[in-house]
Image: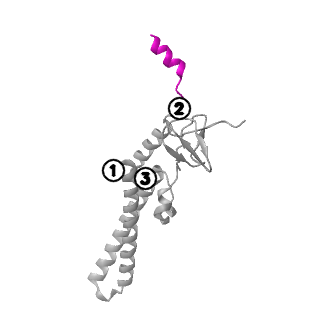
């Protein structure tokens, strides 16, 4: 017999309604991939490695990433933006010093790359602002390690209310 489906937010048993499940306590519909069994909580999705290729993802794709992944990407994007700004400044200085240097195209290309990575930084900052309530000033390796430690020490036990324990307390 299949174990009864439970809400990942409150642990209540769910009612199946077509393709979705319904939680009477949370008053919400849940997709099959959100539903848990045994009163378990939603697992925390995280990668320990974030690659710069993830920076090419669209905003809807970025929205699906975990907060940890977004923090790692923000760190990478800010570094890339800083490097692109320095390159842009170098081309500007070369072109200002020598009008015949012919590096205008390189300056324009660097400028467009700088604008693109700056916009990606804005997207990542705003996604994190939605989740955390603020935009991190700086994302350090230590901050990411601390974040991972908090994930590892997170509450993972089932969400069960023990009614026999409640009755004992009431009779005392």
Q: From the image, which quarter does the C terminus lie in?
A: top left
Side of 59 where 97 appears, left or right: left
Distance, label 2 to label 1, CA atoms, is 29 Å
What range of the chain is rendered magenta? 157-172
Q: Nearer the viewer, residue 148 or 18?
A: 18
Distance, label 3 to label 1, CA atoms, is 12 Å
Q: Provide the residue designation for mark 1.
A: 134
Q: Is residue 64 above or below residue 118?
A: above
Q: Which callout, 3 or 1, points to the residue nearer the camera?
A: 1
Q: Are marks 3 and 1 in contact (CB under 8 Å)?
A: no
Q: Is residue 30 above or below residue 169?
A: below
Q: Provide the residue designation for mark 2.
A: 159
Label 2 residue SS: loop
Q: Nearer the viewer, residue 9 or 60?
A: 9
Mark 1 closeness class: few <14, some 14–19, many ≥20 residues within 10 Å: few
Label 1 residue SS: loop
* Circle count: 3
Q: Is residue 7 above or below residue 77?
A: above
């Amino acid at each position: 017999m299949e174990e009864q489906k439970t809400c990942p937010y409150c642990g209540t048993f769910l009612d199946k309604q077509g393709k979705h499940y319904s939680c009477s306590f949370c008053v919400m519909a849940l997709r099959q991939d959100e539903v848990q069994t045994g009163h378990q909580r939603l697992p925390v999705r995280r990668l320990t490695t974030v690659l710069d290729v993830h920076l090419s993802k669209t905003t809807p794709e970025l929205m699906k990433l975990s907060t940890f992944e977004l923090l790692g990407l923000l760190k990478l994007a800010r570094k890339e933006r800083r490097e692109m700004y320095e390159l842009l400044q170098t081309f500007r200085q070369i072109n200002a010093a020598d009008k015949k240097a012919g590096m205008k195209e390189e300056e324009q290309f660097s400028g467009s790359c700088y604008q693109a990575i700056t916009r990606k930084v804005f997207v990542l900052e705003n996604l994190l602002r939605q989740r955390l309530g603020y935009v991190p000033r700086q994302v350090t390796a230590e901050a990411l390690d601390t974040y991972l430690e908090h994930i590892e020490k997170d509450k993972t036990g089932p969400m069960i209310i023990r009614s026999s324990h409640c009755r004992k307390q009431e009779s005392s």
